[in-house]
Each structure stands twice: as structure tokens, then as C-alpha cells.
Amino acid sequence: MPMWGVGFAVLVGMSNGSILQFLENRRKVHHDAINFCQAILQKKSIEWKAVHRNNLSQPINDVDLVITLGGDGTLLQASHLMDDKIPVLGVNSDPTQIDEVEEFGSEFDARRSTGHLCAAIVENFEQVLDGILEGQIVPSELTRIVMSVNALHLPTFALNDILISHPCPASLSRFSFRIKEGDQPCSPLVNCRSSGLRVSTATGSTAAMQSAGGFPMPILSQDLQYMVREPISPGATSDHMHGLIKPDQTIVATWTCRKGVIYIDGSHINYTIKAGDIIEISSKAPVLKVLLPHQL
């Protein structure tokens, strides 16, 4: 019984007529995509129901496929409620139009949804869906991040990345970390004063990690990539500010600030930490089955 999530955002209060028209067009394109995809599903001999992303709060069970209609953010939100048994198909409801970017690029950001993880758009949705139903298109298994604080596992797995930092972006983050394999250390203890610690999967390596100077990874890699953000005077430990965490390794960090937050796949899901907390991060989470675009 397929199921899908729907996501959209509307901005108001901007005086520029071109921007308002652009945003209104985005809203219309998204809603047209919803109606179009629902009409396709109604033609198929399958059971399905539509669920707005704001109403997604419980684990997703008892379905054969999740279809997210929106962009990568909608797929990410659904992934937090999914285990490693149900595949997800992302449909980019509002992809960027190159001609718009060229026409309006000097006035405002005319890019639409990136949809990096979305295997379908409205125009090929039925073709992709049929390929899935007929077993011709199969999902890939993407690595996720599992975290624990003081040996207690957090309930949310990260598909893209996590950021551990002080809740105020202008404040210093203090922590130490080392990489372990089992109980054996694989790196020296690294003491950090910085703006935080980011850890990404291969999926997330082309997002904030790459923007901060990291490198893109093959999307099926099981490694994690970590980076200390804006380290202050790293000295002898500078070689350990950025690197990889192998599938059999764990990065263990001790937080030494009074306040701290673990942000998972952006800012919407977060957990507070305090001085003395020990955070363990690894790729030992259940994978996520994703129908990927052919270019990935």
C-alpha cells in the first residue's frame, strides 16, 4: 500500500512584483504536481493515501513504498520515520528551470527545488512508478548516522549530516574527540575550540560538508566524513581536523561547553547536550532504501 508525503513553503510580504509572481508560480506548480501524481495513482491497481508532511509524526509501517512529493527536504523528513525495510521514491515537484535562472538571475535567486535525491519529476513519474511496480527499478541502500549520548541511542538517524555546536552561532564550541575501533583508539585525543563538529554521510557529502571545504563521496560509500568547523589554533592536531570514519569505527566526542545542540539533517530535529556529555557517532544505523536518479 504506497504512501506519500507532501511539502511546500510560501513566502509573503515581498514588494517586488517579479518575485511575488515567481513564488505564486512555484506554489501553483507544486499543487498541480500533487494533483497530477494523484491522478496517476488513481489509475493503478494499488491502495494508497496522501499524508501532508506536517502530519508525519509516527513511524511509517505497513506500506510497500513511500513516495515523497516536494524536494529533498520532504524526503529527508520522511526518512526520519522509516526503517531499512520500506523503499522511498522522491518526486521533485518543482525543479529548477534554467531559462528562469538566466532571465531573473540578476534580480533574485530564481532556482527552484534541487531534488538531488529525487528519481522522478512530474513528466516521468508514471514511467518510474511502473518500473518500480514491475521490479525493473530497484532501490539503493544509503548509509545513515546513528548517535548516542551517554550510551543512550538517539531515536533519529541522519541521512545527510549532523552538526554538534553551541546553540548560539557566535559562541565558541569546546569539545574533544578521538576515533575508535571497538575499544581501541585509532587517533590521538583532539582538543578543539571551534564553531562545532560536522559529520556527514556520503549522501550529505555534497551539501554543507562540501560547501565547508569537504569532498564529495560516492553515494553508496559506507564511510562517514567529519570536519571540525573553523578550528582555532589547531596546532599539532591540524591533520586531524578533517577525515573519514570507516564503517567499523566510531567517533567519540566529549562536550565541554555548558550548552550544546546536536542538529540532525538541518535544524528541525535537534537534541540538547551539556558539559560532560559523551557523544558516539557511527554509520551503524539501519540503511535507507532509496530509488535514486540514474545519474547517481
Image (spheres, helix red, strand yellow):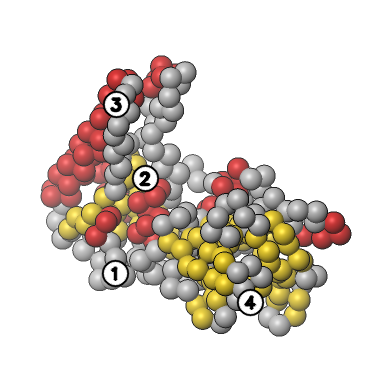
The numbered dot on residue 58 is 1
Kindly state the secondary structure of the residue where label 4 is placed: loop
Callout 3: SS = helix
Real-space CA distance between mark 4 and mark 1, rounded to the nearest whole angstrom: 32 Å
173 lies left or right of 261? right
Q: Foreground residue, 207 or 86?
A: 207
Label 2 neighbour load within 10 Å: few <14, some 14-19, many 20+: many
Marks 2 and 3 in Cβ contact (< 8 Å) = no
Report the residue marked by disc 4: 276
Classify mark 4: residues with Cα within 10 Å, few (<14), some (14-19) or many (20+).
some
Alpha carbons under labels 3 and 4: distance apart: 49 Å
Q: Are marks 3 and 1 in contact (CB under 8 Å)?
A: no
Q: Earlier in the sequence, mark 3 or mark 4?
A: 3
Q: Residue at x 41, y 17 (%)?
A: 103
| Residue pointed to by mark 2 | 71
Q: CA distance from mark 2 to mark 4?
A: 38 Å
**Discs 4, 1 touching: Cβ within 8 Å:** no
Residue 199 position in % (x across, y down): 60, 59
Tell which tag, 2 or 1, sits nearer the viewer. Answer: 1
Q: Which residue is mark 3?
A: 20
- Provide residue 109's location: percent of width, then percent of height: 44, 28
The residue mark sitting in front, 3 or 4, is: 4
- Say which of marks 4 and 1 sits in front: 4
- Amino acid type at circle 3 is Leu
